[in-house]
Amino acid sequence: MPTGRLRQRFRLLGPAFVAAVAYVDPGNVATNVTAGAKHGYALVWVVVLANAMAVIVQYLSAKLGLVTGRSLAGELGLRLPRPLRVVYWIQAEAVVVATDLAEVVGGAVALHLLFTLPLLLGALLTVAVSLVVLRVEDTRGQTALEHVIMSFLGLMAVGFVAGLFVGPPDPGDLVRGLTPSLTGNGSVLLASGIIGATVMPHVIYLHSSLTVGRLEQRGAGLPTRALLSATRADVVAALCVAGLLNLSLLVVAAANLRGASGTDTLQGVHRVIVSELGPGVAMLFAVALLGSGLASTAVGNTAGAEVMRGLIHRRVPRIARRVVTAVPALVVLAGGTEPSKALVLSQVVLSLGIPFALIPLLVLTSRRDVMGPHVNRWGTTAAAGCVAGLVVALNATLVCLTVRG
């Protein structure tokens, strides 16, 4: 391949890394650490399976945007009658708000761990910094946003992987963890949480939009098949990074925090890391958690803007959207709610929104009148159908178990 064409394809990498941030948000951090602390290496296979499923879903989302030139929300906005579009938009916005709740709370907890700031003040600072990140996209474009988000991912990689060097895992136990098994109701609940949280509805909407921008700005001169090839590489690379970070969190907890009390909360995890791995690793963990919250909340806000634009054809100023979606998190923290409970609540709302994003994505990418010659092959449709069925079933299980306490 000529050097110029190779360079152009390399420039197409990036959108999947923005989407990948959602897979290492504060909710996922808490779930993976708890899984390792309570069940050791037993759920390693679940993290690997969840990441493989995420690759399929995010590729289909990106593919829809590249082939049709519209996001998933935009496609639904064209096909649904107005009353249904409004109802659909309301549930999608509820997902965005729930996402923001988790990210802002995670950022607030990180600032509390690092600087002992009150949670409410930490939440306000998280919201303010996310506005700065969003301003980068407004002034310098999508590519600049991708670079910022990738920098956050690099920061998270340092913080979440550091524990592996201080307290390395047992290779044999790690390999045995790849064998599927579940040990009691507790592991079933955590496995449901890991897989259920793998597919984030707001990122499905967003990823298709990001690839539309990439096609318009950086894909000139390349055929659609070449763009799809670059997209597959982008998705695999980005989600390998996210998967390794999630796996590192579980493995560090399995190797060093097994059986420790207090790992059900982020603050408790931090205390245990201080005692077992030292204050240096604990500080890096808190910094990575902060990066996770800041990056994820900026991505969630961008997704919300796309949902509104695609479904009801409206735009609101970034600041207004940022303030409105942050209100629930601020109210929750001002009311004294334990942050981990807020994270659980957000995951339940996200679970309810999964079918509304995942099923239409599968249907649209399987239709020849939508995708033309790039319609899903039968094997892709079958694999995506299995993923959709499993994720929806596990999210329903997670909701039922959470409601039942």
Image (spheres, grey):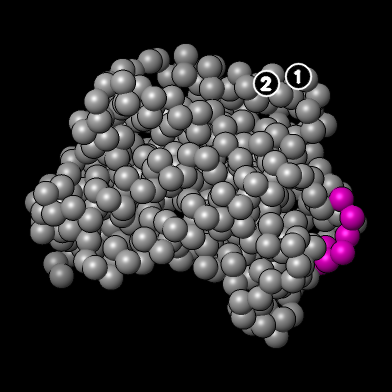
- Look at the picture and state if 231 lies above or below 144: below
Q: Where is residue 283? Give x, y as percent.
A: 76, 48
- Look at the picture and state if 19 lies above or below 165: above
Q: Which of the image's four quarters has the N terminus?
A: bottom left
Q: Residues within 10 Å of mark 2 (few under 14, many from 20)?
A: many
In terms of depth relative to the viewer, which is nearer, 310 or 129?
A: 310
Query: Which range is magenta?
Result: 256-262
Which residue is rendered at x = 78% and y = 28% of the image? 337
Q: Where is residue 363? Give x, y as percent.
A: 27, 50
Residue to which mark 1 is pinned: 334
Going by the numbered disc 2, the residue's amino acid type is Leu
Drawn side of residue 400 relative to residue 337, left or right: left
In the rendered structure, are the residues bearing label 2 and label 1 in contact, judged by CB atoms less than 8 Å apart?
A: yes
CA gap between label 2 and label 1 equals 6 Å
Which residue is rendered at x = 31% and y = 48% of the image? 361
Secondary structure beneath disc 1? Answer: helix
Which residue is rendered at x = 58% and y = 22% of the image? 326
In terms of depth relative to the viewer, which is nearer, 121 or 23?
A: 23
Drawn side of residue 354 relative to residue 180, left or right: left
* Secondary structure character of the magenta stretch overall: loop
Q: Where is residue 243? Give x, y as percent.
A: 53, 62
Residue to which mark 2 is pinned: 330
Q: Is residue 171 magenta?
A: no
- Look at the picture and state if 17 lies above or below 101: below
Going by the numbered disc 1, the residue's amino acid type is Ala
Drawn side of residue 246 relative to residue 250, left or right: left
